[in-house]
Image: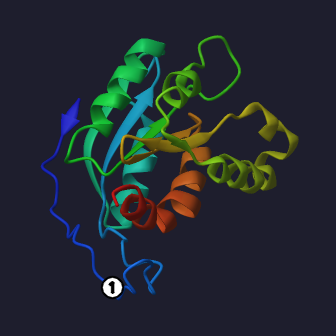
Amino acid sequence: MRSVPPQPHDRSKNGESDGNHSHDHHHHDVGNPNVAVLTVSSSRSVEDDPSGDAIETALDDADYRVIEREVISDDQDAIRSRVETYATDERVDAVVTTGGTGVTPDDVTVEAVSSLFRKELPGFGELFRRLSSDEIGTRVIGTRATAGIVADVPVFCLPGSENAVRLGVSEIIVPELPHLVGLAQR
């Protein structure tokens, strides 16, 4: 496991309000979120984790900060425990997992994490599969990429492929993360 001190960001609520609703839909956005990255694999290490590297690079390129990065085995209880630990860590604004979203018996990330969701974000998986179909065609039906809110932290579960994580992080997570974090922490 690798840990980096988080970079502080302003979590204060700003923007104009009429007392009930904000006039600025993005006034709760969090700048430069702190992210924990969890690779689920029985054959990888942090030193040999191309998908985790791709996630970290895409987040770094967006000036987001990866404050935790770890590789754990395909064990449902261990995955659930680790995601729950990250989601309740005050330094962590979001969690991105890679691996374990397919249909083999070892693919248990979705089962482990979705049981923790306070709210599911079905649009994430729907959009991910739509965008992925341009690259992999009908094979997209084999991915169970998903996302939801655990405690007050957005958690995204991506496949283990480098191309899939680049797509999911760059095209969906990076543009929407500050807004989702801000809304989840309200």
Instruction: Give the residue at x 37% y 31%.
Output: 83
Looking at the image, residue 177 lies above or below residue 138: below
> Residue lying farthest left?
5
> Residue lying farthest front?
19
Would residue 47 be visible to someone looking at this image? no
Q: In which quarter of the image is the C terminus?
A: bottom left
Give the x, y percent position of residue 32: 29, 66
Would residue 30 be visible to someone looking at this image? yes
9 horizontally vs 119: left or right: left
Instruction: Give the residue at x 52% y 61%.
Output: 170
Which of the two residues, 64 or 51, is positioned nearer the viewer here? Answer: 64
Which of the two residues, 134 or 87, is positioned nearer the viewer here? Answer: 87
Give the x, y percent position of residue 178: 39, 66
Q: In which quarter of the image is residue 60?
A: bottom left
Mark 1 residue type: Gly
Looking at the image, residue 51 lies above or below residue 6: above
Q: How crowded is mark 1: few (under 14 residues within 10 Å), some or many (20 or more)?
A: few
Looking at the image, residue 41 lies above or below residue 64: above
Number of marks in picture? 1
- The image's colour scheme reads rainbow
8 horizontally vs 29: left or right: left
Q: Quadrant of residue 164?
A: top right
Instruction: Give the residue at x 20% y 48%.
Output: 91
Q: Quadrant of residue 185?
A: bottom left
Instruction: Check disc 1 and report the residue beneath it.
Output: 15
User: Which type of secondary structure does the marked residue at label 1 adopt?
Assistant: loop
Give the x, y percent position of residue 19: 37, 81
> Residue lying farthest right?
138
Q: Quadrant of the N terminus?
A: top left
112 horizontally vs 65: left or right: right
